[in-house]
Amino acid sequence: MGKGCRRPPTVVPAVEADVPQAAPGREPQPVPTLNQVEEITRKGRPVSQFVDSILNLSPVLAALLIFALVFAEDAFFLGFVIPGETAAILGGVLASHGRLPLWLVIVLVVVAAITGDTVGYEIGRFFGPGIMRLRMVARKEPQVAKAQELLRRRGGTAVFIGRFTAFFRAVMPALAGMARMPYLRFLTFNAAGGLIWGAGAVMLGFLAGNSYQSIARLAGQGTALAMAVIVLAGLLLWHARRRRSAKDVSAPKE
């Protein structure tokens, strides 16, 4: 071509934006809105919501609520609805946040557990078989039968063991009262179980702290809690024996 001629511009075909395509045979997934994401998050974190609501209470109200839930679990069979173990663990969470002293939470939970069991024992002793006709108890007849059999075979030991299982914890005091177990014998095993269970549950919550997923796994898991408190009891026993041995060695010989 001559110098006076210009080459016509090259026409470049338009290129469509690279939009991700759905896999063959699948419908494209819609992008969730912000409200949908928040709703999914809320549904996935029921424990954290419950903990947050407790943390927003004043320390006095939170302490009273924890005491009431643990007490009512055994005294009025509230354990069929909300295990006192959950309240005890949440008490430990409050202590980890500095809302309540750790020692106070342990004392509240232990005292509530022992006194609640005592009330449950007296209810079983005075009202007897009438308790078995309560709707919430009658629906659990097979489990109640197992608890009665355990109490018949193990006596006071069943009261201690029952403390570490949610269902047995709710019914064992009343069954012991119905069976006319001597109160001092009941109190001995009840206090031992309440002390270990209460301290162990609170410490689990204290160590879990903000880990709501851990709390969700711990709450209601009687087996896991029993293992934890048994380990704690073993450590305390080992420490006591070690101190006793040290005293024996240092004591002057005659």
Image (cartoon, rainbow, N blue to C red):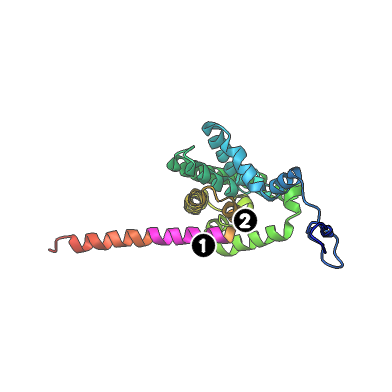
> Closer to us: mark 2 or mark 1?
1
Give the residue number, with chain letter if any, for mark 2: 168
Q: Magenta part mainly helix, strand or loop?
A: helix
Q: Dot 2, how many residues are within 10 Å of its Cα: few (below 14), some (14-19), or many (20+)?
A: many
- The quadrant holding residue 251 is bottom left
Q: Helix or strand or loop: what does disc 1 sit on? A: helix
For the record, the magenta segment spans 224-236
Q: Name the one closer to the observer, 213 or 103.
A: 213
Give the residue number, with chain letter if any, for mark 1: 227
Residue 187 horizontal side relative to residue 69, left or right = left
Does residue 78 show up magenta in the picture?
Answer: no
Which quadrant of the figure contains the N terminus? bottom right
Q: Position of residue 195 (x, y in %)?
A: 47, 50
Q: Where is residue 137 in the image (x, y as percent from the top left)?
A: 72, 51
Q: Where is residue 75 in the image (x, y as percent from the top left)?
A: 61, 43
Q: Earlier in the sequence, mark 2 or mark 1?
A: 2
Q: Helix or strand or loop: what does disc 2 sit on? A: helix
What amino acid is labelled 2 in the image? Phe
Residue 192 horizontal side relative to residue 164, left or right = left
Q: Dot 1, how many residues are within 10 Å of its Cα: few (below 14), some (14-19), or many (20+)?
A: few
